[in-house]
């Protein structure tokens, strides 16, 4: 009989429970082979019993490497403009094309964004960091090397706390922490466009030299849900800071997942790297599939290859890309054209130095905005709403930012606060109207809060009438529906007027009057 996944984790339990249910079938018909061991994954970080099966559990280990495109008007080492979907090779300077004699000039904005991100992630900011050359040969890397920070990165030893639903229940959440090993500045490469019909590859260098922050997370996670939750929180932090728009659909946030499994008390297993995942949903699926694949392979007596894989979203599985057994020699060397990057704080800043020509870590620290975790706490403390409701407000804000070119525009939290300021209804009731009624409409029509046909003023006005018992809840919802363009509800109101006037009213005039009132 197919082995049963006896280890159901709280937090990652939903994933493993579904896998376990698939295994509960006739012998040999499940996705796992006979004799496969159980999977251990615990949202609180501890081991769980393997149960009656007596089988030694597997411990999945997940680490992430994340490339975030810095929100800057120009590239990391040149003055070329940064613009998504510009005509191919239209934003390429001589330096980007690696013409002889060109030299890099460091973009101050990119350094400030990296420092800001490091501070937000509780990192130690190195006052002296170094640039290195990482050599490898791709058609879209014209210099034959990438400028990065291998030896001494700009920020190290940080942490990221994120919230995780237990068994997919928003009302039951735990907070977990993943360590941040380092944050380094580096160049992006160009883009290779493969034309299979003509058997040729075209190169677009618009992206070559765009500033990136590479964030390396320690292997502190154990399943796809944890990885997805961590990246979701990081994405929201980057957007709050303005250091990256982090729109995954535009390649501004790309994730590489390192996955391995091992038995308790044993060293970590051989890891595989799943490259360039461009969706949080795909990240969760890719990690969980890769864990399942490795357990199945080892359960069959096979071995795991140290290889790079890609996630095929159509097939829902990872596929091999290239073997990593023979370690590539990147021939790291100090970048000779860039001096050490020197940063200052209030204590080390020389009195006679022009403050405009240096970067002051403390100056940036003092100007950090409230981070998402602080915003959620304030919403709960100030308005008495449930923690899961504050989480929904900010997650919706994030989803809108990911679909918008203007990631700092006011979102759902601001809408909620504006309504509360203008209405006599208690915030706990207001949040219900926003999350249950307004949000469902916006989702259905793929609208941002800014595009909502129901303004915060109108909703507050309706809720005031409702609180005074001048209108019913049904009537308030009908008004919202009409404002949202629901013609059926408008026709229903016209019918009610006709009924009340015993057919003596002019329906055309009634419609005009209603539309006029609703547009005010």
Image (cartoon, grey):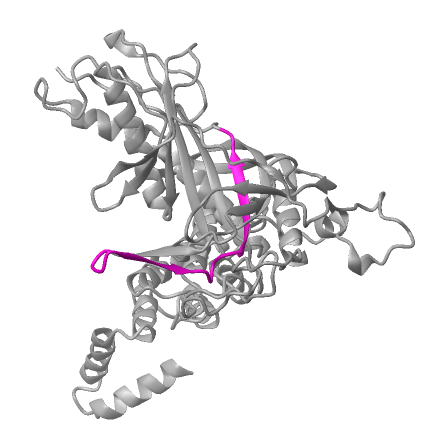
Q: Which residues are magenta?
A: 196-218
Q: In percent of the image, x 33 and y 45: which residue is there?
A: 281
Closer-to-camera residue (338/8): 338
Specify the quadrant that holds the C terminus: bottom left
Residue 77: x, y in percent? 61, 57
Closer-to-camera residue (174/140): 140
Q: Quadrant of residue 322?
A: top left
The single residue placed furthest to the front in the displayed view is: 100
Q: Is residue 29 above or below residue 404?
A: above
Q: In percent of the image, x 19 and y 92: which residue is there?
A: 504
Q: Is residue 498 above or below residue 70?
A: below
Q: Is residue 178 left or right of residue 113?
A: left
Closer-to-camera residue (207/89): 89
Q: Is residue 388 left or right of residue 294?
A: right
The single residue placed furthest to the right in the displayed view is: 352
Q: Is residue 133 left or right of residue 257?
A: right
Residue 176: x, y in percent? 49, 31
Q: Quadrant of residue 29?
A: top left
The single residue placed furthest to the left in the displayed view is: 26
Q: Is residue 492 left or right of residue 452?
A: left
Specify the quadrant that holds the N terminus: top left
Q: Is residue 482 above or below residue 520?
A: above
Residue 380: x, y in percent? 54, 46
Q: In percent of the image, x 44 and y 71: which residue is there?
A: 455
Can residue 197 be found in the magenta stretch? Answer: yes
């Amino acid at each position: 009989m197919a082995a049963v996944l006896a280890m159901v984790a709280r937090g990652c339990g939903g994933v493993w429970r579904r896998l376990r249910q698939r295994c509960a079938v006739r012998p040999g018909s499940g996705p796992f082979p006979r004799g496969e061991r159980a999977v251990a994954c615990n949202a609180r970080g501890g081991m769980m019993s393997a149960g009656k099966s007596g089988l030694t559990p597997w411990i999945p280990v997940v680490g992430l490497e994340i490339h975030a495109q810095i929100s800057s008007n120009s590239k990391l080492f040149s003055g070329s403009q940064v613009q998504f979907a510009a005509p191919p090779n239209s934003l390429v300077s001589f330096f980007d094309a690696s013409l002889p004699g060109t030299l890099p000039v460091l973009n101050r904005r990119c350094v400030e964004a990296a420092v800001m991100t490091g501070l937000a992630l509780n990192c130690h900011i190195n006052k002296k960091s170094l640039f290195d050359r990482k050599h490898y040969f791709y058609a879209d890397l014209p210099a034959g090397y990438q400028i990065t920070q291998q030896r001494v990165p700009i920020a190290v030893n940080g942490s990221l706390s994120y919230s995780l639903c237990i068994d997919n229940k928003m009302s039951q959440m735990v907070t977990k922490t993943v360590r941040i090993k380092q944050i380094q500045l580096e160049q992006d490469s160009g883009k290779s466009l493969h034309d299979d019909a003509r058997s040729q590859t075209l190169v677009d260098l618009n992206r070559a030299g765009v500033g990136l922050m590479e964030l390396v997370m320690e292997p502190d996670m154990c399943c796809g849900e944890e990885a997805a939750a961590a990246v979701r929180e990081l994405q929201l932090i980057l957007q709050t800071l303005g250091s990256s728009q982090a729109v995954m659909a535009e390649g501004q946030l790309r994730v590489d997942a390192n996955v391995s499994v091992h038995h308790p008390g044993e060293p970590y297993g051989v890891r595989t790297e799943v490259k360039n995942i461009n969706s949080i949903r795909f990240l969760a699926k890719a990690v969980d599939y890769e864990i399942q694949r490795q357990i199945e392979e080892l359960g069959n007596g096979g071995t795991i290859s140290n290889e790079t894989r890609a996630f095929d979203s159509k097939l829902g599985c990872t596929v091999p890309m290239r073997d990593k057994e023979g370690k590539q020699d990147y021939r790291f060397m100090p970048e000779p054209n860039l001096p050490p990057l020197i940063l200052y704080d209030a204590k080390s800043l020389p009195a006679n130095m022009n403050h405009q020509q240096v970067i002051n870590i403390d100056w940036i620290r003092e100007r950090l905005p409230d981070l998402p975790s602080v915003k959620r706490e304030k919403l709960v403390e100030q308005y008495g709403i449930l923690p899961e409701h504050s989480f929904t407000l900010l997650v919706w804000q994030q989803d809108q930012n990911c679909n918008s070119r203007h990631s700092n525009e006011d979102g759902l939290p601001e809408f909620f606060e504006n309504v509360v300021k203008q209405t006599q209804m208690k915030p706990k009731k207001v949040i219900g109207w926003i999350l249950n009624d307004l949000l469902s409409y916006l989702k259905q029509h793929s609208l941002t809060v800014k595009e909502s046909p129901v303004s915060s003023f109108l909703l507050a006005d309706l809720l005031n009438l409702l609180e005074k018992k001048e209108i019913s809840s049904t009537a308030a919802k009908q008004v919202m529906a009409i404002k949202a363009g629901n013609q059926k509800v408008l026709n229903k109101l016209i019918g009610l007027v006709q009924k009340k006037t015993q057919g003596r009213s002019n329906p055309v005039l009634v419609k005009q009057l209603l539309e006029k009132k609703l547009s005010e």
